[in-house]
């Protein structure tokens, strides 16, 4: 059986770096999701393929570990493959490599299939499960289990969802949630530290006109923060996350 993972190459652009000249985590997550799109297109199960059947992909959880952030104009390769299935949860893994083959980071993610009209999750269709996984490919540890709950916020920001936050699924794209969750942290932390790990859980949708509250606070573990995003219009919790930072 042929391995059905994929490899996509990118060059870090100036619009995707921070003040230190390093790629931001939201930019790297975007690369990973583009690579997943490339791979699912080859397999015939891309978002476009699903939309023809009234379905779509929805990211439910993602855990990322970064060992080194690539520089501006650095060439990177993103490797991705479907790594497993648990009931309605489909797992996909990623690895990011430098041009020299150095492992820069890795991630595991969980995806669901949604009915675009009913806005409800559905059982994984046969045409998706029929796509074979890579035999013998060692998966990364699945992202599972509960995240610690943010009890009392130390930092808070609010933003209103605009048209450019909306993606093909007609809801806020997950990378915007990631940006808002990180942006609430103090500038001193963002300037002096590197985001080493993030575990982010997506729980609900939001759309144009919604007001989003992003909150965060230090966790009991050193250099770790808990995050929460809430839709103030509906009262629904949109995102839970935990981040770990390295000096």
Image (spheres, rainbow, N blue to C red):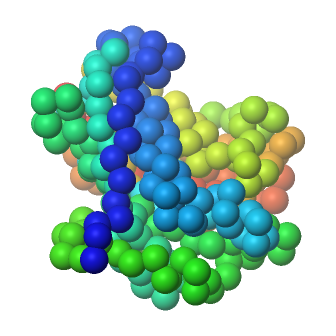
Classify residue 76 as left or right of residue 185: left
Which residue, as the protein is rendered here, is positioned at the far front? 1
Image quadrant where one finds the N terminus: bottom left
* Residue 66 showing in the rendered view: no
- x then y, percent, for residue 69: 26, 29
Q: Is residue 126 visible?
A: yes
Number of labelled discs? 0
In the figure, 8 relative to 124: above or below? above
**Residue at 45% of width from left, 55% of height from top?**
39
Compared to residue 42, the image places residue 28 above or below, namely: above
Picture quadrant of residue 103:
top left
Pick whichever, 158 or 55, lies toward us.
55
Question: Would residue 100 appear left or right of 142 to someone viewing this image?
Answer: left
Of the pair 79 and 225, the residue shown nearer to us: 79
- The residue that appears at 67% across and 82% down in the rendered structure is 122
- Report x, y in % for residue 116: 79, 67
Left or right: 225 as drawn, with respect to 127:
left
Q: Is residue 28 above or below residue 242?
A: above
Where the C terminus falls, by quadrant?
Answer: top left
What residue is rendered at 21% in x and 32% in y?
98
Instruction: Indicate the position of residue 30 as horizontal and vertical percent values.
Output: 49, 39
Q: Position of residue 156 (x, y in %)?
A: 59, 37
């Amino acid at each position: 059986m042929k391995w059905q993972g994929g490899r996509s190459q990118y060059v870090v652009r100036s619009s995707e770096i921070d003040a230190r000249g390093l790629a931001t985590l939201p930019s790297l997550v975007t690369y990973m999701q583009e690579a997943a799109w490339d791979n699912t297109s080859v397999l015939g199960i891309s978002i476009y393929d699903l939309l023809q059947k009234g379905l779509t992909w929805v990211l439910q959880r993602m855990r990322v570990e970064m060992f080194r952030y690539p520089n501006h104009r650095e060439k990177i390769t993103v490797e991705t493959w479907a790594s497993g299935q648990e009931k309605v949860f489909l797992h996909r893994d990623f690895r990011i490599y430098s041009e020299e083959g150095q492992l820069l980071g890795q991630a595991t993610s969980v995806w669901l299939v949604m009915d675009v009209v009913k806005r409800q999750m559905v059982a994984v269709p046969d045409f998706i499960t029929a796509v074979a996984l890579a035999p013998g490919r060692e998966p990364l540890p699945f992202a599972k289990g509960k995240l610690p709950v943010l009890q009392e916020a130390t930092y808070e920001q609010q933003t209103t969802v605009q048209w450019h936050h909306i993606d093909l699924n007609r809801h806020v794209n997950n990378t915007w949630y990631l940006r808002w969750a990180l942006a609430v942290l103090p500038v001193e932390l963002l300037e002096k530290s590197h985001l080493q790990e993030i575990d982010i859980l997506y729980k609900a949708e939001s759309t144009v006109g919604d007001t989003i509250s992003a909150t965060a606070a230090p966790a009991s573990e050193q250099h770790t923060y808990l995050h929460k995003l809430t839709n103030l219009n509906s009262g629904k919790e949109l995102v839970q996350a935990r981040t770990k930072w390295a000096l």
